[in-house]
Image (cartoon, rainbow, N blue to C red):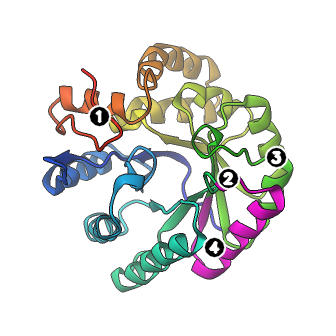
């Protein structure tokens, strides 16, 4: 499959006001990201609080993103869950709306939570979803959220599925990430953790799906480009300077801290959906 993006994709927050999606501020966030030169945008991810959006809201976000972004940067939609039928319904909606809009997006699918599938079940899950939706797919491994880790051997098998075009590795285990990169040479692997970005680049990751880039794209992007252009010491210096911010963005569960920081600079209201509560 063709590379979806190289560099930095921002995992966008979903702004709320009075428990409704704040479409005006959402549009401003999108335009700000594009003006800052982001390489791709992810909607409906963990940072976007997808699990607490209704089906109608998920459809509305998809329509809004397609209309607002168009083909200006690659679009990725998180459609993960634990029920393949529900995931496929949302993925087919993405595919149909994208065809109407003349856009070719990607989808991101996490391992199913709560069900805690076996390796064989994980492979069958991703095979069914990708073969049905037929869109470029990023496989998202985040065991701290889902309760199941996609081990490197299983990931390598999944990565050979026709529509798999990327892997977001958020296991937090650099040894595992290194093994995944080595076992999946045909598939772009992306860091799923800002605090591990530079080590991930050092072992071969092709970029990051970033929370911190919600605040500013350039520092996140510059770390990657400095490393890739043969300036590892400069990349390290910048990474070390940004690391306290990255750590603070995960001081409690994401996206609580990043929404707090965005609110401080006046970009959104500091509003989340239960069970998440804002911090100051």
Disc on the earlier residue, 3 or 4: 4
Considering the whole magenta stretch, tell me its main secondary structure: helix
Disc on the earlier residue, 2 or 3: 3
Disc on the earlier residue, 2 or 4: 4
Q: Give the x, y percent position of residue 107.
A: 52, 64
Disc on the earlier residue, 4 or 1: 4
Disc on the earlier residue, 1 or 2: 2
Dot 1: what SS?
helix
Separation of marks 2 and 3 at Cα, in angstroms: 14 Å
Residue 174 sits in quarter: top right
Instruction: Check disc 4 and report the residue beneath it.
Output: 129
Q: Which residue is drawn at 73% across and 73% down?
A: 162
Is 259 situated left or right of 41 in this image?
left
Separation of marks 3 and 4 at Cα, in angstroms: 20 Å
Q: Residue 152 carries which label?
A: 3
Range drawn in magenta:
115-138
Q: Give the x, y percent position of residue 99.
A: 42, 84
Whether residues under marks 4 and 1 lie with C-beta atoms below 8 angstroms apart, the answer is no
Q: Which residue is drawn at 29% across and 34% down?
A: 259
Whether residues under marks 2 and 4 lie with C-beta atoms below 8 angstroms apart, the answer is no
How many residues crowd around disc 3 within 10 Å: few (fewer than 14), some, or many (20 or more)? some
Q: Give the x, y percent position of residue 6.
A: 56, 50
Quadrant housing the C terminus: top left
Q: Give the x, y percent position of residue 245.
A: 41, 19
Instruction: Check disc 2 and report the residue beneath it.
Output: 188
Separation of marks 4 and 1 at Cα, in angstroms: 31 Å
Q: Which of marks 3 and 4 is in front?
A: 4
Is 140 situated left or right of 218 in this image?
right
Separation of marks 1 and 2 at Cα, in angstroms: 29 Å
Instruction: Check disc 1 and report the residue beneath it.
Output: 259
Quadrant housing the N terminus: bottom right
Whether residues under marks 2 and 3 lie with C-beta atoms below 8 angstroms apart, the answer is no
């Amino acid at each position: 499959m063709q590379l979806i993006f190289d560099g930095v994709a921002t995992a966008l927050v979903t702004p709320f006001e009075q428990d409704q999606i704040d479409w005006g501020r959402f549009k401003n966030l999108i335009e700000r990201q594009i003006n800052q030169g982001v390489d791709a945008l992810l909607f409906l991810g963990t940072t976007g609080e997808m699990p607490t959006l209704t089906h109608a809201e998920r459809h509305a976000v998809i329509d809004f993103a397609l209309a607002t972004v168009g083909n200006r940067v690659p679009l990725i939609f998180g459609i993960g869950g634990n029920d393949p039928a529900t995931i496929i319904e949302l993925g087919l909606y993405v595919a149909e709306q994208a065809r109407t809009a003349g856009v070719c997006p990607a989808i991101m699918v996490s391992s199913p939570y709560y069900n805690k599938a076996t390796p064989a079940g994980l492979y069958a899950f991703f095979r069914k979803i990708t073969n049905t939706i037929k869109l470029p797919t990023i496989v998202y491994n985040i065991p701290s959220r889902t309760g199941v880790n996609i081990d490197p051997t299983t990931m390598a098998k999944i990565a050979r599925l026709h529509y798999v075009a990327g892997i977001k590795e958020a296991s937090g285990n650099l040894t595992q990430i290194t093994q995944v990169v080595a076992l999946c040479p045909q598939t772009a692997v992306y860091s799923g953790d800002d605090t591990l970005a530079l080590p991930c680049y050092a072992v071969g990751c092709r970029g990051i799906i970033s929370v911190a880039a919600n605040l500013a794209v350039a520092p996140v992007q510059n770390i990657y480009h400095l490393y890739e252009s043969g300036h590892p010491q400069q990349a390290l210096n910048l990474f070390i300077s940004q690391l306290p911010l990255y750590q603070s963005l995960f001081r409690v569960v994401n996206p609580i801290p990043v929404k707090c920081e965005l609110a401080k600079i006046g970009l959104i209201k500091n509003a989340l959906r239960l069970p998440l509560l804002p911090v100051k």
